[in-house]
Amino acid sequence: MNNLIKLLDKNLEYIQHQIIEDTIYIYVKSIKEYPCCPYCGTTSKKVHSRYKRTFQDLPIQGLKVKIIINNRKMFCKNDSCNH
């Protein structure tokens, strides 16, 4: 399953999956140790908060597919960046 997740993004890692009724839920997380600020590109290791993002993919064997990503929001350590 991890190889399938790597096709989506090399920085994702498979955690687990569940089949509930007609839906398969696939849980993944980012393995990027020091994410970059999307505004200035500075790397950071200080976590601001954590949240989950869910998106739906194409069905597999008639089951709906929902991928849940455990994300981290980081503080930007660049003083000249306003984000």
Image (tube, helix red, strand yellow):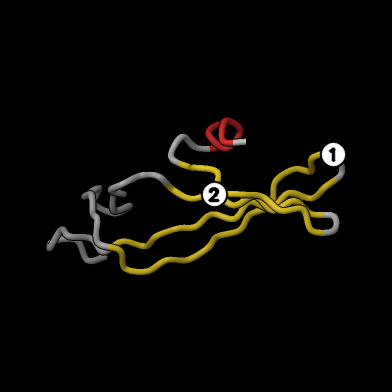
Q: Nearer the viewer, residue 4 or 77?
A: 4
Q: Position of residue 53 (x, y in %)?
A: 55, 60
Q: Farthest bottom residue?
A: 49
Inspect the image, locate mark 2, and give the three-letter code of the amino acid beneath it. Answer: Val
Q: Residue 83: which quarter of the image?
A: bottom left
Please state if 49 lies on the left or on the right of 81 as rendered: right
Q: Residue 7: which quarter of the image?
A: top right
Query: Where is mark 1, residue-wise?
Result: 61
Q: Is residue 59 above or below residue 73?
A: above
Q: Position of residue 33 (x, y in %)?
A: 31, 46
Q: Position of residue 41 (x, y in %)?
A: 25, 47
Q: Residue at x 62, y 36 (%)?
A: 1
Q: Residues within 10 Å of mark 2 (few under 14, many from 20)?
A: many
Badge 1 element: loop
Q: Farthest left residue?
A: 79
Q: Position of residue 36 (x, y in %)?
A: 29, 49
Inspect the image, locate mark 1, and give the three-letter code of the amino acid beneath it. Answer: Gln
Tell whether label 1 touches label 2 (CB within 8 Å).
Answer: no
Q: Residue at x 61, y 58 (%)?
A: 54
Q: Residues within 10 Å of mark 1 (few under 14, many from 20)?
A: few
Q: Residue at x 24, y 61 (%)?
A: 46
Query: Where is mark 2, residue-wise?
Result: 28
